[in-house]
Structure formats: structure tokens, C-alpha cells
Amino acid sequence: MVEQYSKMKRSSIANIQGILPILVLLNEMVEDNVIQDFAIGGGFATGLHDVPYTTKDIDVFCVFNIKSLLIDLSPIYKYLLSRGAKWEGNDFIVGTWPIEFIPPTNKLSEEALQNAMRVTIKDIPTKLFTPEYLVAIAIDTNRPKDKYKAIDLVSGGKVNLPELENILKKHNLMSRWESLKEREGL
Amino acid sequence: MSEEQIKKLQERKAALREKQRNLSLEEKVQILEDLHEHSIFIKENPIKRIK
């Protein structure tokens, strides 16, 4: 399997099929110094930890090469477009998958990136936000769809609750968590 | 549908979710790909209203 995907390395991504070549691409972006590091969060990561469900895109949280206070995304644009990705709305389209490259927007997402778990999927290494950080971020963003994700992850038994509460306390999110627990009977 | 039938459906749903929860990463990736392809198909082939 590794051999199959090594043939895809550094080639055009215009017509790739599926998720696995995207994971190879993300590793290549690190190897080529386009980004320093990445981890997959959002609904995609939630589906991999819990029950897979339809997600509209893949959220890739990245550590960018920051030269100033402003995050320069142009190296990513140039790199992906030169390899055959398309740009639509807020997302790059790689194969059939929209991918949103997201810089950490606060301390919580920075920490989530730093503490991302390493996994391999068909011998391809990648990183996912842990269930605890996915729940914490869902509580932080506080949108209804994110709260459902948090509820599903917790109900599914995939979350280390003491670890989650440590994260929530650190980021002043305990009151929201207590309200959610009471409302949903968690 | 009786309460008993509803309860059985809910139990089956919970059992299926538990089964999916414990699939391997590779199997979950396959499901995510299948769901994604299906959503593209639905988008490109909208269901027409029956008048």
C-alpha cells in the first residue's frame, strides 16, 4: 500500500480519488516546508473517532511558517494550485474533497494542534485532534452543530472526561460544559 | 408504529452506531469516502418534486 501511494508523491493532485492521497499530500506539504505541521480537526476527525457521518470538508489546522505577525498563506496557494488543486470559496478542492487550511485562532486550537495524536491509515501517517480537544473546541465555538458533535463524542465513550475537564478549566469553558451536561443528561 | 416497535428500532440504531464506532480507522475512512461520494451524487442529481 505504501508503494502504491509513494508513486503518487509529488505528482499532480488534479484527479486524485479518495482521502488517502490527501493524507500523502499533507505530509508532502510538511516535507516541502510549505507548512510546519498539521492536524485534522472538525467533523472529519470526529467521524474517525466516533461514528462516521457526512462532512462537507476536511478541516486541516496548520502551523504556518510565520515571518511576521501576519500569517502568509500565499505559499500554500502557490503550492497547491501548481499541483492541480482548485480554489472555490474558502476551500481548496483536492480531488473531490474541499479542504480548509486553518491557522490556530486561539490558545485552545494551538494546544489542540500541539497535542494532536499520531495515527496511521493504511501506512500513511497523519495527525488528528484528540476527542478531548474536539469536544473542548466544539464547546468553545458553541454552534448547535458543534454541540451535537460534542454530545456524540462524550456519549460514545471516546472522551477521557478528567482530561477534558482539565482542558475546559484551563480555557474557562467549564460553565458551558456544566450547562451542556445538565441539558443533555451527560 | 407501536411503542415496542419504536423501542426495538432505537435499540437497533444504537447497536449499529456502536458497531460503526468500533470500526478500524481504515473502515471509517472508507465510510467517509462513500458518504462523500453519495452527497456529491445527491447534489448533482437533485430529487425532483412530484407534482
Image (cartoon, rainbow, N blue to C red):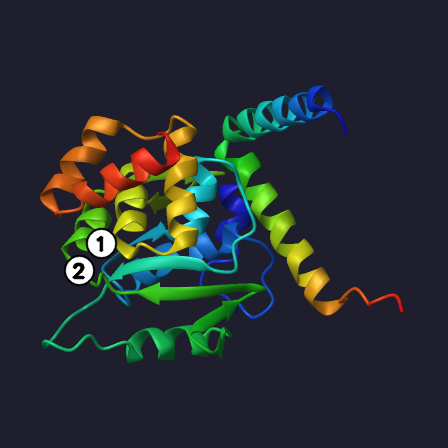
Residue lying at 43% horizontally and 29% vertically, measured from the top left: A156
Q: Are marks 2 and 1 in contact (CB under 8 Å)?
A: yes
Residue lying at 36% horizontally and 58% vertically, measured from the top left: A60
Same subunit under labels 2 and 1?
yes
Tell me the chain of label 2.
Answer: A
In depth, the one of A91 and A3 nearer the eye is A91
Tell me the chain of label 1.
Answer: A
State how many labels appear.
2
Residue A109 badge: 1
Residue A109, percent from left and from top: 22, 54
- Up-down relation of residue A172 to residue A178 (above or below): below
Q: Identify the residue position indicated by label 2 in the image.
A: A106
Residue A108, percent from left and from top: 18, 52
Quarter of the N terminus of chain A within the rendering: top right
Q: Secondary structure at mark 1?
A: helix
Residue A19 placement, left or right of A28? right
- Up-down relation of residue B19 to residue B27 (above or below): above
Residue A129 visible in the shown view: no
Q: Secondary structure at mark 2?
A: loop
Label 1, residues with CA under 10 Å away: few <14, some 14-19, many ≥20: many
